Image (cartoon, rainbow, N blue to C red):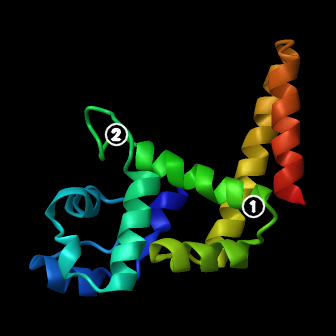
């Protein structure tokens, strides 16, 4: 999954501020729990604080009982990438946006591969929906395929 490849670029700086070792994989349980509970945001520089606040706001805002280990952050991250693509950003621009907005490093080639896989998944959903007579679902899948492929 694409979320497994996402790394927090300033993980070592954050580690120094936190006072304990942090993984650089953004969606690992230890990183998610640390960002949500153990990091003193007031001690961080302005840019790092802004990135972590944006990350928390956009990916850690679910109300699940098992949050942040419920899978919602990863799902929201995937949706963010697809939404950015549907807004017209290419894989390089998406990578740059994620780095600037959230401090998340993700190779453009990984994003491109993920988007291609997403199109294949949507094509399968479309085919099954058509077989089951679920026209609205098939139309939604076609619409998303078209937006991603633009």
The quarter holding residue 42 reads bottom left
Q: Nearer the viewer, residue 60 or 2?
A: 60
Neighbor class of circle 1 (other Cα within 10 Å; few <14, some 14-19, many 20+) is: many
Q: Residue 75, relative to residue 7: is it above or below?
A: above
Q: Residue drawn at (61%, 75%), measured in percent from left and top?
A: 97
The residue lying furthest to the top in this view is 133
Q: Which one is earlier in the sequence, the residue at label 2 or at label 1?
A: 2
Residue located at (52% from left, 55% from top)? 77
Q: Secondary structure at mark 2?
A: loop
How far apart in space, not on screen, are marks 2 and 1 (Cα)? 25 Å
Which label was assigned to residue 70? Answer: 2
Residue at (18, 81) in percent of width and height: 43
Q: Nearer the viewer, residue 124 or 13?
A: 13
Q: Residues within 10 Å of mark 2 (few under 14, many from 20)?
A: some
Residue 71 got which mark? none
Q: Is 130 displayed left or right of 99 in the figure?
A: right
Q: Is residue 121 above or below residue 24?
A: above
What is the secondary structure assignment of the residue under circle 1?
helix
Residue 48, given in percent of the width and then of the height, sits at 35, 80
């Amino acid at each position: 999954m694409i979320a497994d490849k996402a790394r927090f670029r300033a993980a070592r700086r954050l580690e120094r501020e936190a006072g304990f070792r942090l993984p650089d994989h953004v969606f690992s349980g230890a990183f998610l729990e640390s960002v949500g509970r153990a990091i003193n945001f007031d001690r961080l520089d302005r840019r790092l604080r802004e990135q972590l606040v944006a990350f928390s706001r956009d990916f850690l805002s679910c109300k699940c009982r098992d949050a942040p280990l419920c899978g919602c952050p990863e799902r929201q991250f995937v949706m963010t990438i697809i939404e950015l693509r549907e807004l017209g950003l290419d894989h390089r621009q998406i990578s740059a946006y994620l780095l600037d907005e959230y401090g998340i490093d993700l190779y453009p080639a990984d994003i491109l591969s993920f988007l291609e896989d997403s199109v294949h998944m949507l094509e399968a959903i479309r085919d099954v929906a058509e077989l089951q007579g679920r026209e609205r679902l098939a139309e939604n899948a076609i619409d998303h395929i078209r937006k991603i492929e633009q």
